[in-house]
Structures are given as C-alpha cells and as structure tokens.
Image (cartoon, rainbow, N blue to C red):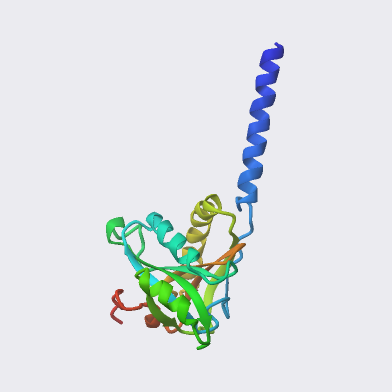
Amino acid sequence: MVECGCLAYLAVTLLVAGFLYLTYNGLLYPIVLRTAKPPYICNQLSVFYKVHVGAYRNVGTIFDEARKLLPSSDGSTLGIYYDDPNTVKEENCRSVVAAVVGENGSPIDASVKQRYLQAGFKQYELPAVTQAVFCYFPFKGIVSILISVIRVYPKLGKYIQENKLTAFPMMEVYDKQTVAFIAPLEHQKFFYPPGIEVPKE
C-alpha cells in the first residue's frame, strides 16, 4: 500500500510539474488579436535574410545562424511565411528568415554587414507599416514556439476571415522574451524579397 501511495504521489507530482512547465511556456497565455499599428514593422527594417523552401519546422537552424551573427544579444530575428501548409505541400512552402540590423535607414556597421554576407545572407529593406493584425506570445524556447504555433495561427486565421481582411504574409518577430505574430494589411508586396515571387494581384 505504501508503494502504491508513493507511485500515486509521484504521478501527481509529475503531472503538476508538467502542467506548470507548459503554463510557463504559454499554454494558458491570453491571445489578444488586434488591428492597429504593429510592433517592430511600424519602422522600416534593415535585414539580412535567407530563403527557405520546405517544411517550416526546419527553419530553426537558419534562425540560430541569424541570431548568432547579431551584433547584440538584444537584437531581433524574424520569419516570414508565404504559404499555407494546409493547402501547399510542405516541401513547397516558402519562407524567409532574417536578422534585424537597423531601423529607418540607420547606418549598418560594415563588420556586421560583412559577417552576414559571408554567411550567405542577403540584404533587404522591409517597409514601415501603419496597419496590421497582430498579437504577442511569450518566447521561452522551442516548447513555447510549438505551443504558440498550435494556439495562435487558428485564431489568427479565424480573425482575418471573420473581419474580411486581406492580411499577409504571416510574420513572427522574436526578441529575447516575446514573439509577435504579425500579418500586414498594407505594402504586402514589399515583404517579398528577391528569391520569393510576389503574388499576382
């Protein structure tokens, strides 16, 4: 009986610990979608990017590479996702991963530029946007990313459909503690850098 009691206690402890861990990673985090001036892309962003074609789950290595080359640990990285994996074969899904190195035309350090170019990244300017659909989610690591993707995108898609918005492409912007999910409502064609075909109007 004592042994059974210990096993039950251990099982409950593990369940509670697992629940707390998932909660820490955003399991119960409130998802508040809004249409307004968005974070980050409210400014023109200077970025270095790489194009990825294939399953979105495989972009992590490019994110790691982009993040390691940032001049500051406080810098931001972003992903832009152009295809709906529910309707496009995953091997054909197009995305861009980029590091943000400047805003509003500020000078880019020559050594930073050289590092990214030598690593195979290309330079591009993303436009400033005054209107977008967006929400925030805590960024704690790979588990929080998985939870955010499962929780945010269905709500984001439903919000866009119910409000009859033309919001694309889908973006994720990461800083040290937060990921912002953003879908621009204007200047969309300028979020398609060389290497990604702009959709026909």
Left or right: where 68 falls relative to 90: right
Of 179 and 69, the residue lying toward us:
69
Where in the figure is residue 96, as x and y percent of width and height? 38, 69
Of 145 and 32, the residue lying toward us:
145
Left or right: where 9 falls relative to 192: right
Farthest residue to the top: give it.
Answer: 1
Of 7 and 68, the residue lying toward us:
68
Residue visible at 47% across and 76% down in the picture: 112
Q: Quadrant of the C terminus?
A: bottom left
Work out whether residue 166 can be spotted: no
Looking at the picture, does residue 14 appear above or below residue 166?
Answer: above
Callout count: 0
Where in the figure is residue 189, as x and y percent of width and height? 37, 81
Q: Quadrant of residue 66?
A: bottom left
Looking at the picture, does residue 176 appear above or below residue 71?
Answer: above
Of 152 and 102, the residue lying toward us:
102
Left or right: where 157 falls relative to 175: left
Work out whether residue 10 can be spotted: yes
